[in-house]
Image (cartoon, rainbow, N blue to C red):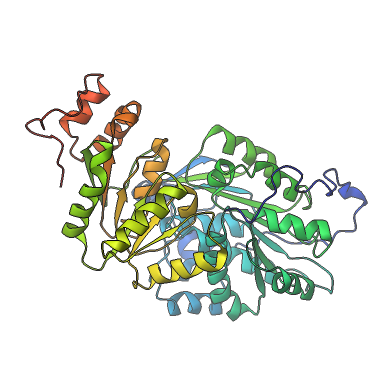
């Protein structure tokens, strides 16, 4: 999924111990923030009240700029503001009101926020301002802004935003990922682009071949850092960062904040980063999502899925999670035979097929998508109405990430979960997520969490097996 990475020797030909003092480096600016008078007029009490209202937590940081509240208070050139309005945006999202002033100030930054919170523009628009202030690229020079992403799908989605907002600023970009021919990507890199969005494997291939270099990169973004580490890309991330000048500006984004991500942030950010968190750091599901859990035997799942789809299928998009690639293919085949408009996506499918499947799903021609966890990482489809956990995941974090594919941007959604005997160790964690979101906890799940689950007995009164 991460761009065709050959995990073992990938990047072995790169010099990991660059002597930057011997390199001829261009001087660069990174502080472009000019506070709007309306923001300057805010008292500390006003700022504290606004951050509390928006659930903006400054976990760490010195001299953190005040948040803005409107597009007009953002110190972007007028053509970028017009592009925001032209794209249909009415006001900045929570992550943008605080993220833009920090990024424009040139500070290193760690941002913890859910997928779908507007973080792409939180790092992209300050990046465009950064690029426009630097000396123009000369022939043979690499990019000024580098965005690392864990998956091809997320990389392509970030590039779509780069196309939209870079066009008005005459900024070129390319998207570098594996699974497709490299000629066009290599041509873009040789011709020169200000922004490169990349997965690790293909980018390292190009670096080793001398197709491009990262000596001009002064604005580094790592998106979905937790997923990058989950997928085993930490060595590749470190190899790539070793090719970038140490006085760069670094922005690291993640949905969660485990110890591994904390260590990576300490190592990648050369200055003490401003660490902001949107919402609580505790693991919890969006309250816009109605969660339904059914305690069920493995052999019952396919029949119950058919019954569920008959109840909820109205042409809206439905995302069904399964544990394995084979399971995805098998379930898809059976559903199509039964007449359901379903397609599967997983890491073994060729890039062309994956692109076609996503297009069919996005445009609603095949509104049921069956996916593995890895295939769904970075998948950003905004109008998914229902998520079905056909196979319950092995980590509760994956449950929260899965159901977070619905109920985005203030919309409501539903998540349906089949919970089987082999997942009994997850009962307590699932119950905690349900309770935090004020969702009904099936009586059988509660008994399982207390070590008393019977499985297979008749549904108990007030919260038995059937939840929908």
- Residue projecting furthest to the left: 461
Residue at image point 62% right, 44% down: 273
Name the spot of residue 331 as percent of width and height, x first.
35, 53
- Residue projecting furthest to the top: 451
Relative to 422, 15 lies left or right = right
Name the spot of residue 125 as percent of width and height, x first.
56, 66
Name the spot of residue 433 as percent of width and height, x first.
30, 36
Q: Is residue 295 above or below residue 75?
A: above
Name the spot of residue 413 as percent of width and height, x first.
26, 56
Residue at image point 58% right, 52% down: 150
Q: Nearer the viewer, residue 137 or 142?
A: 142
Q: Is residue 191 above or below residue 443?
A: below
Q: Is residue 67 visible?
A: no
Q: Is residue 199 above or below residue 367?
A: above
Residue at image point 62% right, 78% down: 169
Residue at image point 70% right, 70% down: 185
What is the tally of numbered marks visible in this picture? 0
Q: Is residue 344 visible?
A: yes
Name the image quarter holding residue 426. Answer: top left
Q: Nearer the viewer, residue 210 or 348?
A: 348
- Residue projecting furthest to the right: 22
Q: Nearer the viewer, residue 172 or 228?
A: 228
């Amino acid at each position: 999924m991460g761009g065709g990475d050959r995990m073992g020797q990938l990047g072995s030909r790169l010099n990991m111990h660059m002597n930057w003092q011997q390199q001829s480096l261009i001087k660069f600016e990174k502080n472009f923030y000019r506070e709007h008078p309306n923001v300057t007029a805010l008292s500390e009490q006003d700022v504290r009240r606004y951050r509390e209202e928006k659930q903006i937590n400054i976990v760490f940081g010195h001299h953190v700029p005040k948040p803005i509240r409107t597009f007009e208070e953002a110190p972007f050139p007028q053509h970028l503001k017009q592009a925001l309005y032209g794209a249909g945006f009415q006001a900045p999202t929570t992550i943008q009101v605080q993220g833009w002033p920090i990024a424009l100030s040139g500070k290193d930054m760690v941002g913890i926020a859910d997928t779908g919170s507007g973080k792409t523009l939180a790092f992209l628009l300050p990046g465009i301002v950064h690029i426009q202030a630097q000396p123009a690229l000369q022939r043979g020079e690499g990019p000024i802004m580098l965005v690392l992403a864990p998956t091809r799908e997320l990389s392509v989605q970030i590039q779509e935003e780069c196309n939209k907002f870079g066009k008005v600023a005459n900024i070129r970009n390319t998207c570098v990922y594996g699974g497709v021919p490299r000629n066009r990507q290599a041509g873009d890199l040789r011709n020169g682009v200000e922004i490169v969005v990349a997965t690790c494997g293909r980018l390292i291939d190009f670096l080793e071949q001398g197709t491009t270099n990262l000596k001009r990169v002064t604005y580094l973004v790592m998106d979905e850092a937790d997923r990058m580490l989950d997928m085993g890309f930490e060595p590749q991330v470190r190899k790539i960062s070793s090719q970038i000048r140490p006085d760069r500006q670094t922005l690291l984004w993640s949905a969660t904040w485990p110890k591994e991500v904390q260590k990576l942030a300490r190592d990648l950010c050369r200055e003490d980063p401003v660490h902001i968190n949107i919402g609580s750091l505790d693991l919890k599901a969006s309250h816009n999502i109605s969660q339904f859990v059914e305690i069920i035997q493995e052999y019952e799942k396919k029949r119950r899925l058919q019954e569920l789809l008959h109840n909820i299928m109205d042409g809206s998009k439905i995302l069904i999670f399964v544990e394995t690639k084979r399971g995805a293919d098998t379930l898809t085949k059976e559903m199509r035979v039964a007449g359901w408009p379903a397609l599967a996506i997983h890491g073994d499918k060729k890039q062309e097929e994956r692109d076609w499947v996503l297009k069919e799903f996005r445009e609603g021609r095949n509104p049921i998508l069956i996916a593995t966890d890895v295939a769904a990482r970075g998948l950003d489809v905004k109008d998914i109405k229902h998520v079905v956990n056909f196979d319950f995941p092995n980590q509760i974090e994956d449950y929260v990430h899965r159901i977070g594919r619905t109920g985005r941007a203030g919309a409501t959604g539903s998540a349906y979960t089949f919970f089987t005997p082999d997942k009994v160790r997850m009962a307590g964690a699932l119950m905690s997520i349900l309770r935090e979101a004020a969702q009904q906890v099936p009586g059988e799940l509660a008994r399982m969490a207390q070590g008393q689950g019977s499985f297979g007995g008749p549904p108990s009164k007030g919260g038995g097996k059937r939840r929908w």
